[in-house]
Image (cartoon, rainbow, N blue to C red):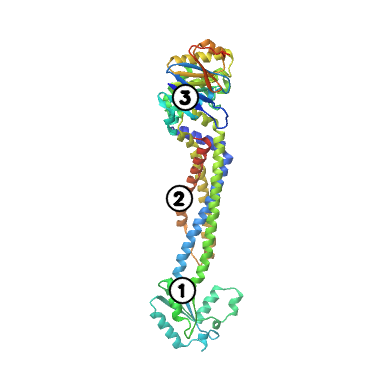
């Protein structure tokens, strides 16, 4: 097998079919970029989950002056009740850490979070509840804590932040699935386009391939230039997709992430993980599409 | 060298078989004319020998090997031992005469050094010694066919199949081509040539196999073209 021969045939092929090669490269780039976005979103979700689950708290809201819940019939929580609740909390084996937030502290946090908006000016410290923020050793054990404390005098409600997050993550998971679905759809489109391009290329070279078959060239030798053409186009597309993702990552990292301080975004390491996957996918996609198209079309 | 035993070939779209129960035995070194009107099965014969098509019934042996037992991926290697020449020359228009002949060696992986040595030799053999760098459209029909013959012969094949090689050539040029084929035959290559050219057949008096509508009607050594009708 003469490498020079194969290389020159590839060069001829790529140049002759330039428009279609470009079409293949663009389609592969878009499909793989979308696929890459899907992968990144998936990793992002995992990262966020890890980050948030680590921070998840059970919040025990203590009765304030205005609470209307039955267990608050006696009015605001008293010092004794507070101490009792604290003791019970400490006694629970599931509890890892307890943090007390007074009304003033809640007020400061509220003001900081909603700084600049009208609501911050209209709220007083009294309107915000005191709370015990509890970190559990195992976030799944929320029920135990809840049942221990709900309805106790002085306790207004027990809230599992994880329930809130679950909803949030369900949205993210759906988003993730949609992106991957779109990406797969694009990948199918890319495969079909590659298939067509190779068919056109094979057709325009049918004279050469016919003579090659007559003269006794082995099937692999005839197919190789086309396969490599397809693979190169796929590789270039994958490189472009990686480039697009890198640009996107830079943009997110430097522009968006600082504004979204409440969560961590996937870093460059995730991107570096994904790039080899994309490159491999690009080459395989094009290579396989070319191979099977040629088999059927050339009867080779 | 080529043996057809009760070979029948039916194409899917045809009502009658392209070849019906053909028995032919061609020995090594023979020169055989395959004559008959269009559609008689001459081209089918050639395609069966190349295993471009598979026989519907019967057995075909090439150099002692049963074609039916040859697996598909071994077919290219078999074809390297069979040179082919066609009516339309089948040269690559963007390559010079040298490159066209070299192509047959390149695709089977022969090294540059060998190609550089052997191609000029065979071009000289066919009488095109100075034309290495000419493009096909710069050559006459006869010269193009010589290039095609050079390409078919460069690998020193056992069999040379020619499907109407003089079909596009004038009588004088045709004679030149036939002389060349005769010379090649005398080096020991078995030559099977399908043709309409009555004059050539009559002149050369080689074995004549006549096909009509897919059946063998005549097999005559030192035969003539004429239909005995």
Q: Is residue B10 above or below residue B205?
A: below
Residue carrying label 3: B6
Q: Secondary structure at mark 3?
A: strand
Of A158 and B196, the residue lying toward us: B196
Graded by Cα atoms within 10 Å as few (under 14), some (14 to 19) or many (20 or more), the crowding at tag 1 reads: many
Give the mark count.
3
The answer to whether mark 2 and mark 3 are in CB contact below 8 A is no
Chain to which mark 1 belongs: A
Separation (CA) of disc 1 from disc 3: 88 Å
- Mark 2 vs mark 3: tell me if same chain: no
Same subunit: marks 1 and 3: no
* Residue A57 numbered mark, or none: 1
| Residue identifier under label 2 | A276
Residue B39, horizontal then vertical, whole percent: 57, 23
Mark 3: give few (<14), some (14-19) or many (20+) Cα within 10 Å. some
The kind of secondary structure element at disc 1 is loop
């Amino acid at each position: 097998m003469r490498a020079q021969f194969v290389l020159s045939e590839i060069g001829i092929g790529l140049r002759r079919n330039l428009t279609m090669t470009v079409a293949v490269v663009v389609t592969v780039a878009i499909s793989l970029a979308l696929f890459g976005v899907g992968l990144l979103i998936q990793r992002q979700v995992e990262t966020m989950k890890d980050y948030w689950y680590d921070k998840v708290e059970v919040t025990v809201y203590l009765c304030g002056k205005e609470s209307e819940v039955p267990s608050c019939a006696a009015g605001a929580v008293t010092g004794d009740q507070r101490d009792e609740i604290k003791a019970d909390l400490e006694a629970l084996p599931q509890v890892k850490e307890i943090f007390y937030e007074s009304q003033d502290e809640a007020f400061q946090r509220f003001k900081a979070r909603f700084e600049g908006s009208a609501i911050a000016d209209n709220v007083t410290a009294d309107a915000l509840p005191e709370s015990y923020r509890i970190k559990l050793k195992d976030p799944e054990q929320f029920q135990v804590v809840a049942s221990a404390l709900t309805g106790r005098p002085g306790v207004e409600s027990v809230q599992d932040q994880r329930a809130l997050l679950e909803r949030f993550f369900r949205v993210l998971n759906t988003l993730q699935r949609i992106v991957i679905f779109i990406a797969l759809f694009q990948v199918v489109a890319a495969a079909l386009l590659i298939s067509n391009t190779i068919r056109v290329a094979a057709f325009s070279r049918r004279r050469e391939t016919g003579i090659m078959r007559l003269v006794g060239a082995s099937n692999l030798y005839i197919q190789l230039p086309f396969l490599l053409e397809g693979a190169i186009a796929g590789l270039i597309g994958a490189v472009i997709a990686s480039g697009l993702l890198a640009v996107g990552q830079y943009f997110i990292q430097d522009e968006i992430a600082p504004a979204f301080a409440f969560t961590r975004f996937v870093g460059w390491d995730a991107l570096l993980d994904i790039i080899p996957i994309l490159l491999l996918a690009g080459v395989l996609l094009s290579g396989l599409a070319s191979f099977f198209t040629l088999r059927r079309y050339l009867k080779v | 060298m080529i043996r057809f035993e009760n070979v029948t070939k039916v194409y899917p779209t045809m009502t009658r078989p392209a070849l019906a129960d053909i028995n032919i035995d061609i020995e090594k070194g023979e020169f055989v004319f395959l004559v008959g009107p269009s559609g008689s099965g001459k081209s089918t014969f050639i395609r069966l020998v190349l295993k471009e098509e598979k026989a519907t019934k019967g057995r075909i042996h090439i150099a002692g090997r049963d074609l039916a037992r040859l697996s598909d991926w071994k077919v290219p290697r078999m074809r390297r031992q069979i040179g082919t020449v066609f009516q339309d020359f089948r040269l690559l228009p963007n390559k010079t005469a040298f490159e066209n002949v070299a192509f047959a060696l390149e695709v089977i992986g022969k090294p540059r050094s060998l190609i550089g040595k052997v191609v000029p030799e065979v071009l000289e053999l066919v009488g095109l010694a100075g034309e290495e760098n000419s493009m096909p459209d710069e050559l006459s029909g006869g010269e193009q066919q010589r290039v095609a013959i050079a390409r078919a012969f460069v690998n020193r094949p056992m069999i040379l199949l020619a499907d109407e090689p003089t079909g596009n050539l004038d009588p004088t040029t045709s004679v030149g081509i036939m002389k060349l084929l005769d010379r090649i035959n005398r080096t020991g290559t078995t030559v099977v040539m399908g043709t309409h050219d009555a004059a050539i057949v009559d002149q050369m008096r080689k074995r004549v196999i006549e096909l009509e509508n897919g059946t063998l009607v005549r097999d005559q050594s030192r035969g003539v073209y004429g239909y005995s009708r």
